[in-house]
Amino acid sequence: MKIAKPLVAAVLSGLMLTACASAPTVYRAQAGAPNDVGYSEYRLEAGRYRVTFQGGPGAPEAQIADYALLRAAELALGDGYDWFRVAYRSTSASGYDRGPRMSVGGGSASFGRHTSVGVGVGTSFDLGPGPSFAQSIEVVFGKGPTPRDRDAYDAREIVKTIGYGRGRI
């Protein structure tokens, strides 16, 4: 019995740490599966794309939005444009859990002359890394000075700011 308690504690600790671990969300192209982490794009027409970035479990929503903008900026510069405007934006989440839960149960049984009553209380907590966010944006590219519009972005500035000077393009 002396060995069982530390062993059970070690196993439970390991399970809790495993449940909290998640793969990092890195900026890269999707490997092919629709729910794989990374970006994908679809050319709608000349100078217009739909860009989607799928984040991993627990990645901040703001990071996913930034990576979608970064990919749009790379596409704009790659096609010879200076700026882009976000014409449509959609964010979705999957993997939500409703949080901690508590339940109470009771029961009784009769065995001949003996009767017993029992009450139980149970709790559960979501130890997962959190929801997975995906952002899809439809962008329109342009040349020349960036319009003074809150949905218009200078492609070079986005690559420099969000891309941390990676020199991708």
Image (tube, grey):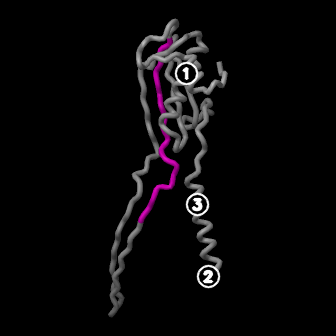
Query: Is residue 58 placed above or below 135 in the rendered structure?
Result: below
Q: Residue at x 65, y 78 (%)?
A: 3
Neighbourhood count class around disc 1 (C-alpha, 10 Å): few under 14, some 14–19, many 20 upward: many
Tell me the tag on residue 83: none
Amino acid type of the residue tagged 2 in the rendering: Met
Tell me the tag on residue 158: 1
Q: Residue at x 57, y 17 (%)?
A: 156
Query: Which badge, 1 or 3, is on the more N-terminal residue?
Result: 3
Q: SS class of the residue under badge 1?
A: helix
Does the magenta portion include 138? yes
Query: Which badge, 3 or 2, is on the more N-terminal residue?
Result: 2
The magenta span reads 123-141
Neighbourhood count class around disc 3 (C-alpha, 10 Å): few under 14, some 14–19, many 20 upward: few
Query: Is residue 24 placed above or below 1 in the rendered structure?
Result: above
Q: Residue 7: horizontal and vertical position, in percent?
A: 63, 72
The answer to whether one can see residue 129 in this image is yes
Q: Nearer the viewer, mark 1 or mark 3?
A: 1
Does the magenta portion include 111? no
Q: Residue 71: horizontal and vertical position, in percent?
A: 56, 24
Where is mark 3, residue-wise? Answer: 15
